[in-house]
Amino acid sequence: MADTQNSRKAKHEALLIIDVQNDFCPGGSLAVSEGDMIIPVVNAIAPDFAIVVATKDWHPKGHVSFASRHGKAPFETTELSHGHQVLWPEHCIQGEPGASLHPELDQRPVTMVLHKGANRELDSYSAFLENDHATPTGLEGYLRTHGISRVFICGLATDVCVKFSALDAVKCGFETYLIEDACRGVDIPEGSVDSALHDMTEAGVRCIGSSDLRHLLGV
Ligand code: VGL
Ligand code: ZN
């Protein structure tokens, strides 16, 4: 393990672990294929960072993103006042087991847990801004307070919350890296993961593998 007292930790870099929750892992209500396979990778890299944020999708019952609320089927879409909304199976309901971080995720290196999507009428894919693209979660301020200039992103799902978090990280001015082998996607419709990787790269996100990390961090 790298989390011995004298191991060096990256000081100006933060790790964002997006939504590694039971509902997004096999057996969960919105399971991402192989979602749990990223957990050993995340556990291995997190101790290299002094600042580690774990986000949780955290919806009240009857959330606006739930297909059941609209009498529609999961993965259909609807228009809301602030834009287009994909409708999901009910997932990550506040306080329920599906919303817990996966039990195999090592929470010891985590310095902040951020709950998002708690507004019943507004979804929040990004860890930085809710889906009105205006309401901040406070994460930018937390990272700036700690002198962070580079963020490394991993978690679930590549084509939803990971993608929007990475795009907003770039917009906030952070040098932004996606750790590809520490992410998995929903991929509905098929091809969504590839197009998400394309969009992120276009926006300036650097896609790396976990084996590149220690060299980049200089730890
Ligand atoms: C997510 C769909 C709905 C995610 C959250 O964490 O990627 N996906 N809510
Ligand atoms: Zn959600």
Image (cartoon, grey):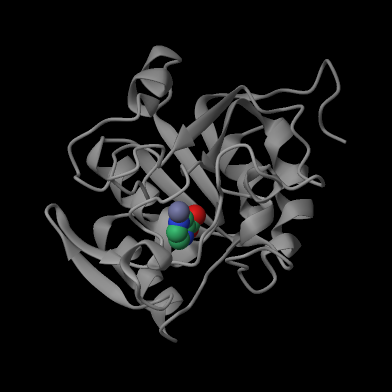
Q: In which quarter of the image is residue 149?
A: top left
Quick check: 59 above or below 74? above
Percent across and percent down for residue 135 are: 23, 33
Most extreme residue toward the left is: 81
Percent across and percent down for residue 169 are: 33, 41
Most extreme residue toward the bottom is: 190
Most extreme residue toward the top is: 145
Q: In which quarter of the image is residue 132?
A: top left
Q: Which residue is more in the foreground, 70 or 105? A: 70
Residue 162 visible in this rendered orientation of the protein: no
Please state, as top left, top right, bottom left or bottom right, where the N terminus lies in the image: top right
Is 185 situated left or right of 22 in this image?
left
Q: Which residue is more in the foreground, 192 or 205? A: 192
Q: Which residue is more in the foreground, 205 or 164? A: 164
Q: Quadrant of residue 27?
A: bottom right
Is 43 situated left or right of 165 in this image?
right
Quick check: 198 above or below 16? below
Q: Which residue shows up at 43% across the image and 24% down it? A: 148
Percent across and percent down for residue 96 are: 66, 43
